Image: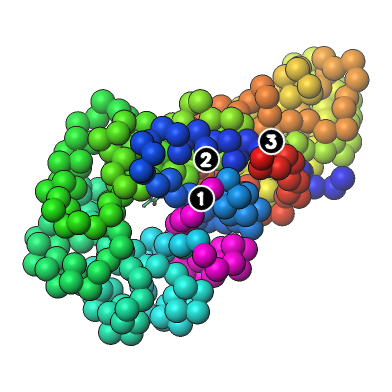
Amino acid sequence: MAVATLTLDLTALAANWRALDRMSAAGVQTAAVVKADAYGLGVDAVVRTLAKAGARRFFVAAAEEGLRAREALGPGPQINVLSGHMAGDTRLIREADLTPMLNSVTQITRHLETLPGHSFGVQLDTGMNRLGMEFAEWEAAAPFVLEAGPDLLMSHLACADAPDDPMNARQLANFHAMTDGTGVARSLSATGGILLGPAYHFDLTRPGIGLYGGQPYGAAQRVVALSVPLIQTRAVAQGETVGYSATWTAPQDSVIATVQGGYADGIIRALSGRATLWAGDVPCPVVGRVSMDMITVDVTHLPHVPDALDLIGPHQTLDHLAEVAGTIGYEILTRLAARLERRFIGTPS
Ligand SMILES: *Cc1c(COP(=O)(O)O)cnc(C)c1O
């Protein structure tokens, strides 16, 4: 085994979707957000698994991602594009039967002129100031847009991972003000919003990270494991240094393992000298810099050095690792997309 192995538990993935689905009332639909190659896990296996589990609606960031999801899913499930209908997307939207989430008058005009009668949704900005139509813009355009028959009105919460943040209630009130009485299906919540409770669920929820086992969904089953193979071990005498820039000096005679996996695999350099790998139940500290393809690990205390060490596993979750690196689980996952071997285990029941 020459590359690090990312193991994805499809049973856990399906279980997380079902558990998030059960958190909202029976009439509320639970979609699945699979942008960025399903957060780096591999969109084909993820959408097939979730479709089997019962998901009928998927969200991607761009039309190109939508095509890929459509090829994996076949006809039937709805695929929504969060960047809307960009110039140049028209053919892809039609041929892959994508539903763009339109976010401006320009996009709405483009969509209605080029693909009249083709499904669409509208994104509203309730305070995040990132994407979607703002209050005044929507107020002016709404009568005409509603006439064209959008099938979803949606917005996105900026602070849903912090339940006590007053921003949540403010955005909720704004969303009501912008959408009450329209008679159109509505969606406000990603994973964090689902956990805020039924007032935030509306007609459809859009979990992403919770499906993949990440915070803020603390009760998620673990979906991802990452194991890195050992290339070589060496004896390093007390006082010798290891790795680029010689940042680590052996405090005693040591045994150092070099494992195959580095920042080109998404094991980001910020983990240098800070992360821990695991030999079964035994922690082994990373020493020195993470390099492009390799990491050096202190295994002096191991009676037997295994063929591979775990970076994400039972003792170190995605979120633990993210914390050590000073980032969030989302970024760790989406960086792991590169050359890792993906192994799928479990089957959705
Ligand atoms: C990424 C995204 C989601 C999913 O968010 P998670 O926090 O991963 O659940 C939902 N809606 C929108 C608009 C997004 O951009």
N-terminal label among 2 and 3: 2
* Residue type at tag 1: Ala
Kindly indicate whether the residue at mark 2 contacts the one at mark 1 (C-beta within 8 angstroms). Answer: yes
The residue beneath circle 1 is 55
How many other residues sit within 10 Å of disc 2, few (<14), some (14-19) or many (≥20)?
Answer: many
Instruction: Give the spatial CA distance, label 3 vs label 1.
Output: 24 Å
- What residue type is disc 2 on? Trp
Residue located at (46% from left, 62% from top)? 78
Quarter of the image that includes the N terminus: top right
Dot 3 falls on a residue whose secondary structure is strand
In the image, is the residue at mark 1 within 8 Å of ligand 1 by its beta carbon? no
Mark 2, residue position: 17
| Vertical relation: 171 (above or below) 96 | above
**In the drawing, what numbered circle is on residue 225?**
3
Task: Indicate the position of residue 203 as horizontal and vertical percent values.
Answer: 31, 47
Q: Secondary structure at mark 2?
A: helix
Closer to the camera, 35 or 201? 201
Q: Which quadrant does the C terminus fall into?
A: top right
Q: SS of the residue at dot 1? A: loop
Magenta highlight range = 54-76
